[in-house]
Amino acid sequence: MENKPKGALSQISKVVDSAIDWIIVIMFASLIVSCVTQVFMRSILNDSPPWTEELARYSFMYVNFIGAVICVREKSHARVTVILDALSGTARKVLEVIADLVTLFVSYVMIRYGTMCVIQVAAQRSPAMRICMSFVYFCIPLAGVFIAAEAILSLYRNIRAKKEEVEE
């Protein structure tokens, strides 16, 4: 049985999860629509608008980075679990906490350097769509913030589960 956060934390978690799910749905839909438009325009009308390729590329970036948040949330990301599967009890919880701390560090790197990248490209515009490149690269620190939140929630769950084991 998974130890779910209670009260206000649970409500915040649900709202954030819903926002993440909607972001990925919207970005995936824009990816599909832009690819279909590109193929249709190129194949049927012999005219390939450059904005469709650009939109597909930028949507793909958001799908990947925000998708990483979902993978962290559901613990479905690629990981080696040989050692974790061999452990139980306190040793397993300690390893899970270490993994959460590593995830938190990686999210810090994403936030810090992603933000630096966003600031660095603020004056640039994309070639076809003429959107600010900061919007394009914003998916990196945004995903970092959401991954950090998921890592903190996981730490909370692991520590709380350990405290409940000790109390029993």
Image (tube, rainbow, N blue to C red):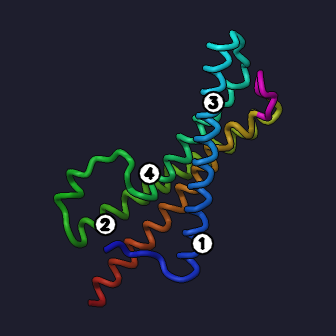
Q: Residue at x 73, y 18 (%)?
A: 49
Q: Nearer the viewer, residue 13 or 156?
A: 13
Q: Nearer the viewer, mark 4 or mark 2?
A: 4
User: To which quarter of the image does residue 36 belong?
Assistant: top right
Q: Residue at x 75, y 33 (%)?
A: 133
Element type where label 2 sits in the image: helix
User: What is the crowding at mark 4: few (fewer than 14 residues within 10 Å), some, or many (at least 20)?
Assistant: some
Element type where label 3 sits in the image: helix
Q: CA distance from mark 3 to mark 1?
A: 31 Å
- Residue 109 coordinates in the image, percent (x, y): 56, 47
Q: Indicate which disc residue 12 carries.
A: 1
Task: Look at label 4 and name its amino acid.
Answer: Cys
Q: Nearer the viewer, mark 4 or mark 3?
A: 3
25 is higher (above) or lower (below) than 90:
above
Task: Look at label 2 and name its amino acid.
Answer: Val
**Which residue is denoted by mark 2 in the rendering?**
94
Q: Nearer the viewer, residue 33 or 165?
A: 33
Q: Looking at the image, tell me whether mark 4 or mark 3 is earlier in sequence order.
A: 3
Q: CA distance from mark 4 to mark 3?
A: 22 Å
Q: Nearer the viewer, residue 163 or 40?
A: 40
Q: Nearer the viewer, mark 2 or mark 1?
A: 1
Is 72 left or right of 62, judged from the image as shown?
left
Element type where label 4 sits in the image: helix
